Image (cartoon, rainbow, N blue to C red):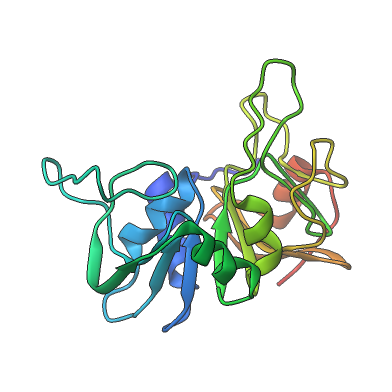
Amino acid sequence: MSSYQKRSKDELARRVAQDIPDGAYVNLGIGQPTLVANHIPAGREVILHSENGILGMGPAPAAGAEDYDLINAGKQPVTLLPGGAYFHHADSFGMMRGGHLDVCVLGAFQVSAAGDLANWSTGEAGSIPAVGGAMDLAVGAKQTWVMMDLLTKKGESKIVAQCSYPLTGIGCVKRIYTDLATLECGPDGLRVIDLVDGLTREALQDLIQLPLAAA
């Protein structure tokens, strides 16, 4: 039986940040992905974008230093690095739709083995659908990465053969970063990039219930 420790939210954010190349223009979705801003490796220039009209965001402000006139798309206070800029959200969406972002990191309810993304609604009665800029980001960015817990609170895999929730984008997700493993997905299915210590590919395959190719 496997004995392993899940990545914490900050450890997962640090793992995502490691793979962002120097000089990349990156959008971080609301929720867990915003933590990536706090873990960009020292000396690496990453230009963070927010769809409400910011380029050049820095890490989260220190406690007591929040400026609520300076927020990201999730209404969280952020900082601005030297050279950062504000602009109209129509220009921001033009950047997204025009293919000017290298990477977007989004949360998800489900991702299929082929890279289909469902992250804006569970379709349940009483839920409030709010797609925001997710559809524009998912298909506009050069690479779409998902950052999420692998399992739901019920212990079900969020990586599925076919999404049952309303789709955000089809075949758009290239990588899935989870608290247990990092995977690539595409037309040929899922490939394991890395696993947390103590977790085997076979044990991960049992959790996901889908074939997994080795790295």
Residue farthest toward the top in the current orientation of the protein = 126
Q: Residue at x 70, y 49 (%)?
A: 204
- Relative to 115, is 96 on the left or the right? left
Q: Residue at x 58, y 68 (%)?
A: 94
Q: Residue at x 66, y 68 (%)?
A: 140
From where the camera sits, is residue 7 visible?
A: no
The percent coordinates of residue 182 (x first, y second) are 61, 60
Number of marks present in the image shown: 0
The percent coordinates of residue 201 (x first, y second) are 71, 56
- Quarter of the image with the N terminus is top right
Q: Quadrant of residue 138?
A: bottom right
The percent coordinates of residue 119 (x first, y second) are 67, 43
Given residues 79 and 20, the one toward you in this image is 79
Q: Quadrant of residue 166?
A: top right
- Quarter of the image with the C terminus is bottom right
Given residues 42 and 46, the one toward you in this image is 46
From where the camera sits, is residue 73 visible?
A: yes
Q: Relative to 97, say whether 156 is above or below.
A: above
- Relative to 117, is 57 on the left or the right? left
Q: Relative to 143, say whether 162 is above or below.
A: above
Given residues 177 and 24, the one toward you in this image is 24
